[in-house]
Image (cartoon, grey):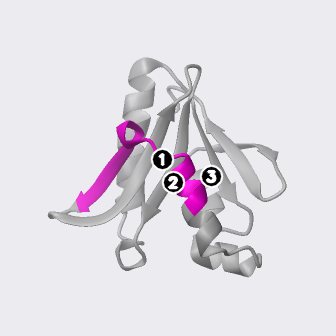
Amino acid sequence: MRESLERLGRFDPDRARERFLGGFDANSTRRIEVLGDLVGFVVIKDQQSELLLDHLYVIPRAQGAGIGSEVLTRIFREADEIGRPIKVGALKESASNRFYTRHGFVFIESGEFDNYYVRASGNAVDLGD
């Protein structure tokens, strides 16, 4: 995410930390581990009518190995079981926009800095990863 923010001239480590800590909820946060190694985290917030995928972060050295796709597959399964759509925001100019659309999210609107997507309940996607 830092690279995307730097491209937009918006990287500020203090603001990024403040934003993350201000919205941190331990009950909504899960560790992503591979063979016992911590490689990232995901934050899913229950917003009653939808699930908000607030953060999905995989450390750079672990990216490109299908970990993010596997995490989404599990989140999709959970969302489908409770019949809820999933909403996510992605920083404009970030590669995450392509990642989310490739996995079945549909663009719904654009804000000042972010694009917003939704994945309808029951919209399972065969990732083939």
Q: Residue flagged by tag 3: what amino acid is it?
A: Thr
Q: Give whichever of discs 3 and 1 has the lower sequence position.
A: 1
Q: Give the residue at mark 2.
A: 21
The magenta-colored residue range is 18-33
Badge 1 vs badge 2, beta-carbon distance below 8 Å: yes
Which numbered marker is on residue 127?
none
Q: SS of the residue at dot 2?
A: helix
Q: Is residue 96 magenta?
A: no
- Residue at 67% of width from left, 75% of height from top? 11
Q: SS of the residue at dot 3?
A: helix
Q: Quadrant of residue 109?
A: top right
Is there any visible trace of residue 80 in the rendered image? Answer: yes
- Residue at 60% of width from left, 65% of height from top? 16
Tell me residue 39's x, y (percent): 31, 66
Q: Give the residue at mark 1.
A: 24
Distance from the alpha carbon under mark 1 to that under mark 2: 5 Å
Badge 3 vs badge 2, beta-carbon distance below 8 Å: no
Mark nearest the camera among 3 and 1 is 1
Q: Residue flagged by tag 2: what amino acid is it?
A: Leu
